[in-house]
Amino acid sequence: METLTLKQKTFNSPITKIILALLTFMAVVVIGQQIASKLLALTPLDKDYRSLLKGLFVSASCILSYILFFKKYDKRAVTEFASKGLAKNLFIGVAIGFTLQSLTILVMYLNGNYSITKVNPISYILIPFAIMFTVAIIEEVLVRGIILRIMEEKLGTYISLTFTSILFGILHLANPHGTLISGICITTAGFLLGAAFIYSRNLWFPIALHFAWNFTQSGIYGAITSGNEKTNNLVEAQIQGPEFITGGAFGPEGSIQAIVFCALGTIVLLLLCHKNNKIIKPYWKN
């Protein structure tokens, strides 16, 4: 049996791999944003179109850097961004994200807490589209593609899924107007997105789900997303009522019904994972 050197053991360590991957990826995000901003500032394009192109450039840089890093580091084909099943993963992810967010808004509407006041031109969705698409790629690569996937190799599915979901919720507590309910909801959403990755073993599925959830909330229904400032949107809406139903200043994803719908989606996906033998056991049980 070949004896590994200290250097080989260090670089093969999951902790080392996670740290190096996170540092590389975040450097690409920061540098990519700066390059895109400077180049697009030289063009006569409208602000909305510059935002859209910047988002697409940063997103492409994120995906390319992930593929190149793990292809070199792991010496393997990076299947997490495989084109096989791409259309299916994108469609199902968008459908689930749109449906769950629409159900969340529907509860508010039926309770008299949501009403549409104005419908804007379709061009108003460009900025939220670019923002939510980029955010979905960055967060899914960081949390599911790097941390969850690498942890799962040693600690198994459930420990890794639980850790990354709680981490996902904690990170969002730093957002403006975060509450206990919003923290629970984002953690539950973390379980949902993690389950989507575990089921598909492909990042396109959770990226599409994440994007659709956020974009539907802000770009279509005109609500606040994760406590951030409102973006342009397709419809202007008046939202008022108890915070546990509306999410208050954090947005509808900080509501009780959002927790319920995300939890139901998670249960369904995890049941499918069990049915299709997608659950990985921790190394000490193998």
Image (spheres, helix red, strand yellow):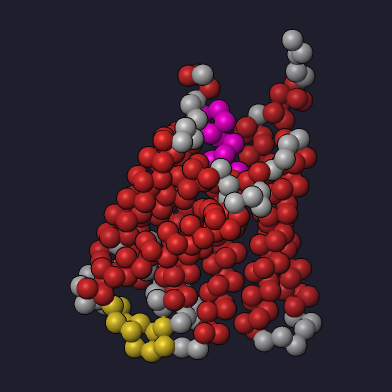
Quarter holding residue 58: bottom right
Residue 218, picture quadrant: bottom left
Q: Is residue 32 left or right of residue 147?
A: right
Residue found at the very far top of the displayed protein: 1
Instruction: Point out residue 114 in the picture as x, y percentages from the top left corner.
Output: 28, 78
Residue at the spot 66% in from the left edge and 29% down from the top edge = 13
The residue positioned 49% from the left and 57% from the top of the image is: 93
Instruction: Please report the residue visible at 64 percent of the width from the left and 76 percent of the height from the top.
Output: 51
Tell me if I can see residue 27 in this picture.
no
Magenta range is 146-155
Up/down of 250 relative to 145, above or below? below
- Residue placed at 72% from the left, 59% from the top? 61
Q: In the image, residue 124 lies at what x, y percent?
A: 52, 84
State yes or no: residue 45 in magenta.
no
Q: Nearer the viewer, residue 88 or 210?
A: 88
Of residue 239 and residue 200, the one placed in the foreground of this image is: 200
| Residue that lies at the very extreme toward the left in this rendered image | 111
Query: Magenta stretch mostly in which secondary structure?
Result: helix
Relative to 16, is 51 above or below?
Answer: below
Vertical placement of residue 146 versus 277, above or below: below
Quarter of the image where the N terminus is located: top right
Q: Nearer the viewer, residue 278 or 170?
A: 278
How many numbered markers are drawn? 0
- The answer to whether any part of residue 245 appears in the image is yes
Q: Position of residue 158 (x, y in %)?
A: 43, 34
x and y percent of residue 203 in the render? 58, 50
